[in-house]
């Protein structure tokens, strides 16, 4: 009696690491791509540091210095919150618009206020650092020329560094959302 749901090769055939997740509810905010390895590694390291900070909190609390333990607990909580926010950073889409989530700031643009969405070759920031390299970026231009275009994705950010195919798929997916909901508005 074959049990295909228990075999390891079926799990690898069924899903690929770079495939986007299916969307069933278009009203909720979804990321049209998986977080990249650089982003996940940075968050994992932050959580590892937070675990050592929590261990230090326990040791300080057992030593009897409760105010110092409170400071350690607060610092560890801040590191955990930063790691969770780092995992949330990226571009999110829904029927209502596109949302660019950064570490400290979030910008939401309704599809009705979007003039165009295109992939261009331009200097992009490498892993969000000040250093720029030549790469691709998905730009959103708002109606009325509301400032410079909003950069949604780049092929050198923490989600797509060394994953060109994943960037192309994610850009095509966001453009498909714009084609479906942006043109109708």
Image: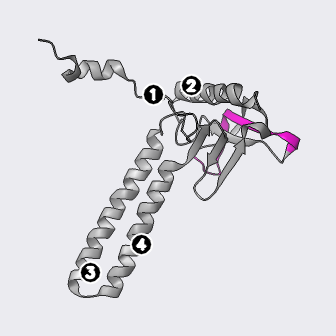
Among the two numbered marks 2 and 4 on one chain, the one whose residue lies closer to the N terminus: 4
Residue visible at 36% across and 74% down?
Answer: 73
Quadrant in the rendering for residue 139:
top right
Percent x, y for residue 141?
A: 79, 38
Q: Residues within 10 Å of mark 1 (few under 14, many from 20)?
A: some
Q: Secondary structure at mark 4?
A: helix
Q: Tell me if residue 96 comes above or below residue 64 in the rendering.
A: above
User: Disc 2 versus disc 3: distance between alpha carbons?
Assistant: 49 Å
Query: From the image, which quarter does the N terminus lie in?
Result: top left
Disc 2 and disc 4: Cα gap in Å? 38 Å
On residue 75, which mark appears? 4
* Residue topped by disc 1: 18
Of the two numbered discs 1 and 2 on the same chain, state the one appearing first in sequence. 1
Position of the C terminus by quadrant: top right
107 horizontally vs 10: left or right: right
Magenta span includes 143: yes
Marking on residue 60: 3
Residue holding disc 2: 169
The span picked out in magenta is 127-145
Q: Callout 3: few (<14), some (14-19), or many (20+) C-alpha neighbours within 10 Å?
A: some
């Amino acid at each position: 009696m074959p049990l295909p749901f228990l075999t390891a090769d079926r799990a690898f055939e069924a899903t690929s690491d770079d495939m986007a997740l299916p969307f069933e509810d278009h009203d909720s905010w979804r990321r049209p791509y998986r977080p990249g390895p650089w982003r996940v590694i940075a968050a994992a390291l932050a959580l590892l540091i937070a675990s050592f900070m929590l261990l230090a909190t326990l040791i300080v609390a057992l030593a009897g210095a409760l105010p110092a333990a409170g400071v350690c607990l607060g610092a560890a909580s801040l590191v955990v919150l930063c790691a969770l926010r780092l995992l949330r950073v990226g571009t999110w889409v829904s029927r209502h618009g596109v949302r660019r989530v950064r570490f400290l700031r979030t910008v939401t643009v309704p599809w009705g206020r979007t003039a165009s969405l295109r992939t261009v070759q331009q200097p992009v920031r490498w892993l969000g650092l000040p250093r720029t390299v030549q790469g691709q970026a998905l730009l959103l231009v708002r109606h009325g020329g509301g400032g410079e275009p909003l950069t949604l994705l780049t092929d050198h950010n923490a989600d797509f560094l060394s994953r060109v195919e994943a960037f192309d798929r994610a850009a095509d997916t966001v453009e498909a959302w714009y084609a479906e909901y942006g043109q109708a508005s």
